[in-house]
Amino acid sequence: MKPFHCGLVLPFFILASGCSLISAGGGAAEKVKVLEYTRYCSQKGCPDFVLSLYHTGHVTYEGKAYTSLMGTHLQQLPEAQWTALKQSMESANLWRIPEEFPISQYYAPVTMIRVFEGEYTKTIRGQELPYELALLVSQLDQITNNGGWKLIAPPTYGLPKGTVPNLLRIQLQANVNFEYWQSKYYEYSLAVVKNIPDGNNFWIFRFDPSRIQPLAFKELLDIDPDVVKSEFEKTNK
């Protein structure tokens, strides 16, 4: 059921003056979230992200895995696009439609949308979506794919400051060929950067952290019998 608004029933993306979370000067406006959009699926390679809309028309994209936009990115939607999006959100009737829609394809992505209004939240998920909701999802996908993003927070992956998340210094067993060994991890785009000429089969490798979380990859290396030891590269800072 749609939440109550200080005596006024308004579309969820409009904040009534008596209930607004915005400061008098408007400085907190960007923090008023109205919608989150993501997709998830059971198969490897599905983009892991959260797209968040704020009532000023600002949008953030937090890329977590299998996306070229890793970290947190920001953009301001053009007024016409933001107006059209608000109209689609109202047409989708998000506060009144069911929370669950059919999920019939195991390997296909599942859409999940959360809407916010004051202290109220609602989560909607499914694959077989009604037309108005599918249209809204299409507009959200267009925002994601159209570019114009500004990186505001690089991903940290839970690593200490000064760690290079996509570079590993790896010592292989003496009898292991590095080219053969790196082919085991082709799905993570593992590639040699350079050899460390100390005679102990030390190498620096690069991999794609959008395909596997750095700590998860380090765990794989820790149990690999061909690896003597591995550690992340550090910056000079």
Image: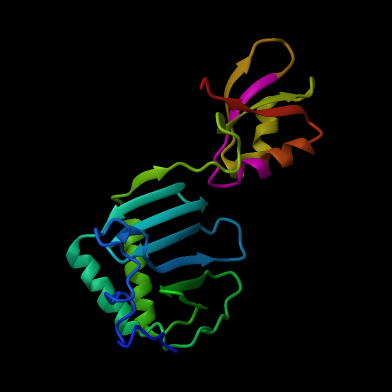
Quarter placement of the N terminus: bottom left
The quarter of the displayed image where residue 198 is located: top right
Where is 195 relative to 63, above or below?
above
Find residue 197 and report its horizontal and vertical position in percent.
Answer: 65, 10
Residue 128 in sight in this render: yes
Asked where in the image residue 15 lies, by quadrant, the reply is: bottom left
In this picture, residue 84 sits left or right of residue 149: left
- Residue 197 located within the stretch drawn in magenta: no
Instruction: Kindly give the residue lying farthest to the top in the view shown.
Output: 198
Q: Is residue 163 above or below residue 124?
A: above
- Where residue 87 appears, as percent x and y from the top left, is 25, 78
Residue at the (69%, 38%) spot, across then down? 218
- Which stretch did the figure color magenta? 202-216
Residue extending furthest toward the left: 80
| Nearest to the observer: residue 192 or residue 93 | 93
Q: Residue at x 29, y 55 (%)?
A: 27
**Residue 153 location, quadrant:** top left
Front one among 11 and 8: 8
Q: Identify the residue at image location x=69%, y=26%.
A: 170
Report the residue that reaches farthest toward the right.
Answer: 225
